[in-house]
């Protein structure tokens, strides 16, 4: 951006080299003296009562140092949301899915630990199981938890505006049913943890997690250790996408094993374990009934959502909350009725996933909008422009959109993709039909959560003028270390390489609630900016003395502190730093960004959920082979209003990543289950997109400063993905005239739909 | 102390359990993935030119990953003092003592590294060597460094008052010559380091050091890496006593080996290497001429000191500076002439040692004071009371004694030991003669040093009301973690267990110049107190809102924040902490204690060297066997004015430790050298005191608040030792009538002196 030296520049990542040459170390690489290796025994039944566990043989195996089972946790249960503490790190009474953790071993090496698992004898009483949410809600279905009637663990019900009047005033109403599938995050680094419990009660842990401070709080509760005796040392994290936003059983189990053995314990999941057992994006059934005016303006919508939470409730309340709250963006929607059910079944539990809640539900609404456009003979771009929210809008449920460039995003992708022309003139080559479709996306830039929210940062200026920046923020691969360093450098008038960012050590680094809900750039970014400003104030006082001017007259640029308008009157930043050190005025700046908006109401779903909302649009161009049913995404034009891009290269990377991830989820990815067992638990059988699947991409950043973002920046990591599914599905319809309402859009589904369509036509 | 809840209490150490059960980990325990083991090849000659080094055979040994020699440091040289950068981490041109580092190897295990050392071929040209400082100063003596004339590397010359007039006005003048010996610190943990050099230039190091921030600065210079890319992670440290106050070659060598191999490298000295080659307290020759009035009042003194620095200059300038500056305490001395020479010889280099500089010189002055008392027939207690400095004194060289209870210390030990009676009536049992003697001690509470000085601390208050305290201060076993935690707890109205102190990680913990010169309690203690006060202010604002009062009315006591004078109107500390977290006002307090006194003049030795000075006295009772010459210290009465004792148990421990260490140095300890080789390099042959050598100890704390100390505290770790030597030597004279002027006072010296005395008498 104009006027900035570091912000807005396409700078390479600060952690790029370390990762490229293998220097970066992850939790599974960590070592401690006298370390043991842990392994977890999991249920082989989807639903069974545990009658007895005999660990004696395992305990006698030479090299085994401890075996733990559920009761060793003393009744402790946890869950992501306050009303959903239903998970014991090791099952106590029952196992509820194939993979439920039952026992764990710590031994001198992994082979011994593995061998010991085979020696643990468990008597199970198998119970009838249920895998489908619809089935699970029926009277007489197997019950997973005593406290849930008909396995309905979560219910959310919101009303914004007046739904009755809304439908009454609608000119056209339609109802549709959509379904999403089970997908996995696909991060490269499996869950891993190294834990050390020391007497009289101190826990030190290195874990692959997006939320070290939340983990710290949980361990404090689980092991009854004060918060100041729980220390999370954060190694590099090999991506998360929401899949590491929560505490994982293995983290708690490793601590327990360490407590029992008095030695550090490391547990690393295999990639197969991750695919088989760990949290996934849930199966959603989304039924929506929408009423519009003749011109396509949305008037009312009713949602009925059923989410298969899997065996434990976990993040479901939050997922369904977010989905409901964000129904009023990115399209103006004055009247909403939202009913959502989270239903337990004997399958692995769901977890947060990129675009959490919003993605799963918005995909349906945005496809249905195309259906409506088709019904009313309105161009899909046109109907979106007609309904797009605008800067200054306050939605029916009180979201306050301080900045919004959605209209420009839609216009830009239409223009870039040559929409009007291509929509008119559809190309046919042999069995291949080309089509073009559009979808829009949106997301929060952080949101105030139920636990603590907020971000802090400190800036330490060294004698040589270099800077140590400490935040509590985890870079999970999305590039926040680079972006936060850029913010610090810009504010201090330094270069990116002058800033070294400290990896988290909760003993010393300041508080931050974690990497989730696309909160980092806005919240931690503001904290860093405030810390840098504080440091600057301290240094300016020293420079002002030296230059014989007042501190207010000074500016920080190009590693110099100079008098505004008189650049020759200056002192180098490094010299001022040295003066500070040797005049006993060492600089330590502190920044705290309070996410000071109201906590949303769980009851009404009303209230401003975020300081800033992002918006975007994507035009997808596809080629559908009507003989094979195969779909190829050939081109993607994406425009995103993420405010000012601190690092355009990083923003583009985020957007490209979402296009690819969304593409995979739309066309290929699905965890296939049979009787509660995942049968395609390898990256050979679970197909994620590869380089050959990449479309031509045209990413357009729509940069307008958000008033609350640091240097005007807002969300960039989750807003786009929600646009990808509908854009592709709508493009397929544009190519071959069929609507596919269930993800993924496999060749079989295309062929079946084409056959039905031909049948209908014939 | 009255009114305090945590300060002044005899609380067990916060690190006591971890150390007692072996949980505490030291640098030599540290592990990193792919770590290599380093070993150092040392010179076997005291003085030789290096003609050639052939490392090819060593490099070819399987398992060897790198071999480095002096030139790999690219000409880098360092030294503790700014004018003494004469040491290359690996010798380049010459070796100057037996043990001088010449080459180093990194290999996959220690055995391979050791084997590789044998394969390094070095061609030496042996040079004539000199071991004795007197010899080395002679014309024609072998020269160690080109820039030193007659090997005189350091010279300090001070004049306070008017020495000529002083002697002219004296009624009695005497001249004596004293000598100290080479002694070693005797710490349990040998030097150890684990270093990792990462690209593009980041150093991470865990080292057994007293001064991590100084090491960080040095590594930044040595490897041309910015300060924010040098990270010191501090493990537990197994004592230092000054012996780990400086960078050690092995630390620099480990980094170089890591840089060359791309893998972490750990080097651990053996205890034998420490005894053979590492820094020791220097051999000093102290000639003093003192003039007094008839009543024993000191009028003038002239010092001539020769210090054998060993092969490199290192801390000698500071040692001789401190010795000169502190000549004016603990006895009033209006006129001083001080000449000191640091002389290089082909022996291992000297280093800082408990009581640095002052101890070595004061021992002579305090023995000579007894000689004068004896000459003038004045009681030793009487002459000390007559000369003792007093609170409010400004010495001849401008030391400002804001607090001083020396007189009370002298009176108390005289009373406690029943001085008057025992001095009169000397006991004789068979060949054993009992005697009683007194000495006084003193020290600074930190001093402003040549590099950065100052201390910072931060206080983070967690949601549950527990506290993380971060300082840059190293607990080397002296108990500072406990004392600083007590200061934080007291200021915040909490209990000791509510505070967790963070071990140093220079990336995140705030700056502190290190653990030396007894600066920690005063400097870091003040920083911690300020940080706690800052945190308190932040929390008080929240509590005040809650209670509907102004923050000024609140006090923090017993884990509560209450209205002063109305204890029922209160909010628990933990609740206020939770309110802070959930109202987005997380508390992070910051404290910075600038050691804002003038930097002493190297030229004049004049200026206030410290914010606060400690004082103390010891009465030693000995039993001397006139047949064997053996001396036993039977009783020690020590009084120490260290201001308010934050933790009296810890203070007593410091004092007891100094009595033992001083006892060892006075009676037993000496590194014996033959032709530049230390011949008693084991704790079997180098006798340190053991439990059977312990005297009955009576430790008396004279507590009066110092105006500058945190809660009135000042130095406690070094002031006593200087009193121990003269007290014992004076007691021996009282028992058997001989003065021993050379340490240690071995049975041989006693017998020789007794024989000479009998000869003289006969």
Image: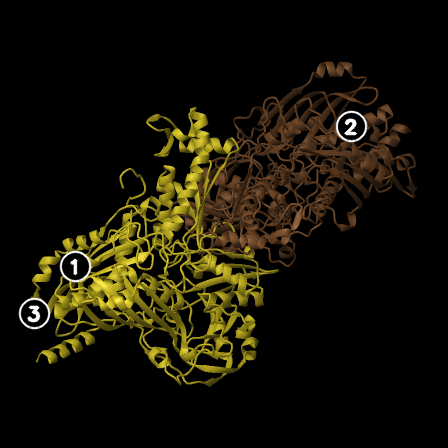
Chain colours: A brown, B yellow
Residue B77 x %, y %: 50, 70
State how far apart marks 3 and 2 are (Cα): 112 Å
Residues beneath discs 1 and 3 located on the same chain: yes
Nearer mark to the viewer, of 1 and 2: 1
Can residue B213 be seen here? The reply is yes
**Callout 3 crowding tier (Cα within 10 Å): few <14, some 14–19, many ≥20:** few
Q: CA distance from mark 1 to mark 2?
A: 101 Å
Q: Which residue is mark 2?
A: A368
Q: Nearer the viewer, mark 1 or mark 3?
A: 1
Q: Are marks 3 and 2 in contact (CB under 8 Å)?
A: no
Pick the front one: A754 or A334: A334
Which secondary structure, mark 1? helix
Other residues around mark 2 within 10 Å, as few (<14) / some (14–19) / many (≥20)? many
Q: Is residue A408 left or right of residue A32?
A: right
A384, A100: nearer the viewer = A384
Q: Secondary structure at mark 3?
A: loop
Q: Position of residue B424 (x, y in %)?
A: 8, 62
Q: Do tags 1 and 2 sit on the same chain? A: no
Q: Residue at x 82, y 43 (%)?
A: A635
Q: Residue at x 51, y 72 (%)?
A: B105
Q: Secondary structure at mark 2?
A: helix
Q: Which quarter of the rendered picture does the N terminus of chain A lie within?
A: top right
State the residue position of label 1: B381
Q: Which mark is residue A483?
A: none
- Give neighbour class at mark 1: few <14, some 14-19, many 20+ (Cα, 10 Å): many
Protein chain holding label 1: B
Residue B146 to residue A54: above or below = below
Q: What residue is shown with label 3? A: B430
Left-right relation of B463 to B347: right
Q: Residue B271's x, y, as percent?
A: 37, 68
Q: Quadrant of residue B752?
A: bottom left
């Amino acid at each position: 951006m104009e006027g900035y030296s570091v912000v807005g520049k396409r700078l390479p990542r600060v952690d790029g080299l370390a990762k490229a040459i293998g220097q970066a170390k992850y939790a599974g690489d960590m070592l401690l003296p006298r370390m043991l290796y842990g392994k977890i025994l999991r249920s082989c039944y989807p639903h069974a009562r545990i009658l007895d566990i005999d660990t004696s043989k395992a305990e006698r195996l030479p090299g085994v140092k401890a075996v733990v089972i559920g009761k060793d946790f003393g009744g402790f249960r946890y869950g992501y949301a306050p009303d959903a503490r239903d998970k014991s790190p090791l099952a106590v009474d029952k196992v509820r899915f194939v993979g439920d953790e039952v026992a764990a071993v710590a031994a001198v090496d992994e082979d011994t630990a593995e061998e010991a698992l085979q020696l643990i004898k468990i008597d199970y009483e198998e119970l009838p199981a249920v895998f489908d949410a619809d089935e699970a809600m029926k009277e007489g279905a197997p019950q997973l938890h005593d406290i849930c009637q008909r396995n309905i663990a979560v219910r959310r019900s919101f009303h914004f505006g007046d739904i009755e009047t809304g439908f009454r005033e609608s000119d056209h109403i339609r109802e549709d049913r959509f379904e999403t599938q089970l997908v996995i995050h696909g991060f490269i680094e499996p869950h891993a943890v190294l834990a050390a419990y020391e007497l009289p009660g101190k826990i030190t842990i290195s874990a692959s997690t997006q939320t070290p401070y939340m983990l710290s709080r949980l361990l404090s509760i689980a092991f009854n250790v004060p918060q100041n005796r729980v220390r999370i040392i954060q190694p590099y994290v090999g991506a998360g996408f929401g899949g590491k936003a929560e505490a994982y059983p293995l983290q708690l189990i490793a601590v327990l094993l360490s407590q029992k053995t008095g030695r550090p314990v490391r547990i690393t999941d295999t990639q197969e374990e991750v695919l088989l057992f760990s949290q996934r994006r849930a199966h959603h059934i989304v039924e929506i009934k929408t009423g519009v005016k003749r011109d396509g303006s949305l008037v009312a919508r009713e949602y009925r959502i059923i989410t298969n939470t899997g065996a434990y409730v976990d993040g479901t309340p939050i997922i369904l909350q977010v989905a409901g709250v964000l129904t009023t963006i990115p399209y103006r929607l004055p009247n909403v009725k939202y009913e959502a059910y989270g239903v337990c079944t004997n399958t692995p539990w769901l977890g947060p996933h990129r675009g959490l809640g919003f993605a799963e539900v918005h995909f349906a609404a945005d496809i249905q909008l195309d259906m409506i456009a088709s019904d009313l003979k309105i161009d899909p771009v046109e109907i979106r422009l007609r309904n797009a929210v605008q800067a200054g809008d306050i939605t029916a449920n009180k979201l306050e959109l301080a900045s919004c460039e959605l209209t420009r995003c839609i216009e830009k992708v239409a223009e870039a993709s040559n929409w009007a022309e291509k929509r008119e003139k559809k190309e046919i080559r042999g069995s291949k039909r080309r089509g073009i479709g559009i979808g829009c996306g949106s997301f929060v830039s952080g949101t105030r959560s139920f636990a603590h929210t907020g971000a802090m940062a400190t800036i330490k200026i060294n004698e040589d003028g270099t800077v140590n920046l400490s935040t509590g923020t985890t870079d999970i691969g999305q590039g926040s270390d680079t972006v936060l360093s850029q913010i610090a450098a810009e504010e201090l008038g330094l270069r990116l390489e002058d800033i070294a960012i400290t990896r988290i050590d909760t003993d010393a680094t300041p508080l931050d609630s974690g990497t989730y809900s696309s909160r980092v750039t806005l919240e931690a970014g503001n904290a860093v900016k405030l810390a840098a400003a504080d440091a600057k104030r301290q240094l300016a006082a020293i420079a002002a003395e030296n230059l014989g001017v007042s501190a207010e007259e000074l500016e920080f640029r190009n590693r110099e502190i100079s008098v505004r308008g008189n650049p020759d009157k200056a002192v180098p930043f490094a010299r001022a730093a040295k003066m500070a050190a040797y005049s006993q005025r060492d600089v330590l700046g502190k920044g705290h960004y309070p996410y000071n908006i109201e906590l949303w109401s769980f009851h009404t779903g009303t209230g401003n959920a975020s300081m800033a909302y992002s918006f975007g649009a994507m035009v997808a161009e596809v080629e559908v082979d009507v003989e094979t049913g195969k779909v190829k995404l050939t081109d993607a034009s994406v425009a995103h209003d993420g405010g000012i891009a601190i690092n355009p290269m990083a923003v583009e990377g985020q957007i490209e990543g979402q296009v690819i991830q969304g593409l995979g989820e739309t066309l290929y990815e699905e965890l296939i289950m049979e009787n509660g067992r995942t049968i395609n638990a390898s990256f050979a059988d679970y197909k994620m997109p590869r380089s050959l699947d990449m479309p031509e991409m045209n990413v357009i950043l729509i940069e307008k400063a958000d008033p609350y973002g640091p240097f005007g920046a807002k969300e960039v990591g989750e807003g786009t993905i929600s646009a990808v599914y509908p854009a592709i599905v709508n493009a397929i319809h544009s190519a071959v005239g069929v609507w596919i309402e269930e993800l993924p859009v496999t060749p079989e589904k295309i062929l079946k739909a084409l056959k039905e369509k031909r049948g209908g036509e014939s």
